[in-house]
Amino acid sequence: MKLKEFTKYLDEEIPLAYQEDYDNSGIQVGSPKQEISSAIICLDVTEEVLNEAVTHGCDIIVSHHPLIFKGIKSLTGKTFTEKILQGAITNEIAIYSAHTNLDAVGNGVSRKMAEKIGLEQISILSPLENQLLKLVTFIPEAHVEKVKNALFEAGAGVTGNYDNCGFTLSGTGSFRGNENANPFIGEKGKIHYEPEVRFETILFNNLKDKVIMALLDSHPYEEVAYDLYSLKNNNIGIGLGCVGKLANPVPERDFLKLISKTFDARGIRHTNLNGKMVSKVALCGGSGASLINNAIRSGADAFVTADIKYHDFFNAENRILLVDAGHFETEKFSREILKDLIIKKFPKFAVRFSETNTNPINYF
């Protein structure tokens, strides 16, 4: 399989448009025409992981954290990143990363955390904004189903757990072609009136080009009329963090034990215990302290994340149990998400987890 086929699929399943501005998800190293047949999946790309890939004959490393975050002005092997890049290029090993875009997709890192501790009624904690567009077009009656199906096939019309969503309204369209026109119906120089259907549907911003191409390819008119509108309503299926409920409320200490066991988290940091029961839980894999207020507003009894700063613990003000379970620990299951995505599309593709513990933090 070509690398470009592999990355195209992952880019569609984990859209790069969902990543944060500072991020650098996507292909890090590799030629689009490169042949690949096996992957090693990790949280971080280290020299040890690269050596594993070489030893096991893996053609590509798929990681959660990108290897390249900042611009590289030279490639001399002076830095940690440069050494790995040199090794990957020398051994013709591609590197692909899915970071904050994997956090944002509906089946992403935080949802995996929620599933691991048995949460129910899971929803997004902080939905992404400005990700939705509305498409309005006008289709001659006889071609409505053909055009609608093409748009849905391209990914338009998805709302939460529903697809093929759209709205139709019948009316009459008019047009007149000049001497250079080649009208599908009607005559040059004469006003033509045609029974048409106004069709509306929504789409994610990252699918715009694909959906418009499907519209133009399936629509019979020489000049296709359509409008695109940016929607202000949040997409509840995409965003950072998640929130859900435990099947049975538990005391705070039992909740901390659950987190420690599930994520193999040692040295958990947390705010004061107040003798409350924990029922509703918010989570965010990795550095999620910026979502503390979102967790409080959601009515969560506890918020599990990582990299909480000293003063953030004060800001909780006993309104919520803050739990810092570690960056590596809260994102470790991202590997499972990536493996499942790859196997779903390429069931015969060889995939293995890295055996290297890349957590840079040790506990005394």
Image (cartoon, grey):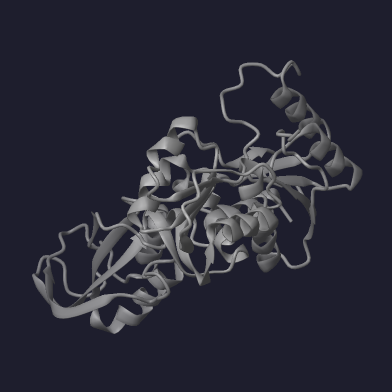
Q: Nearer the viewer, residue 252 or 282?
A: 252
Farthest-out residue, right: 55
Give residue 342's quadrant in the image: bottom right
Res 128 seen here: no
Farthest-out residue, bottom: 142
The correct choice, above or below, for 27 with respect to 224 in the image is: above
- x then y, percent, for residue 327: 61, 42
Give residue 217's quadrant in the image: bottom left
Q: Nearer the viewer, residue 5 or 236?
A: 236
Q: Nearer the viewer, residue 108 or 306?
A: 306
In which quadrant of the rendered image does the N terminus lie? Answer: bottom right
- x then y, percent, for residue 181: 22, 61
- 142 on left or right of 65: left
- x then y, percent, for residue 306: 55, 42
Q: Residue at x 49, y 33 (%)?
A: 309
Res 117 seen here: yes
Q: Nearer the viewer, residue 114 or 79?
A: 114
In which quadrant of the rendered image does the C terminus lie? Answer: top right
- x then y, percent, for residue 196: 19, 78
The correct choice, above or below, for 77 with respect to 120 in the image is: above
Farthest-out residue, left: 191
Q: Residue at x 73, y 29 (%)?
A: 85
Q: Residue at x 40, y 52 (%)?
A: 295
Q: Residue at x 64, y 57 (%)?
A: 257
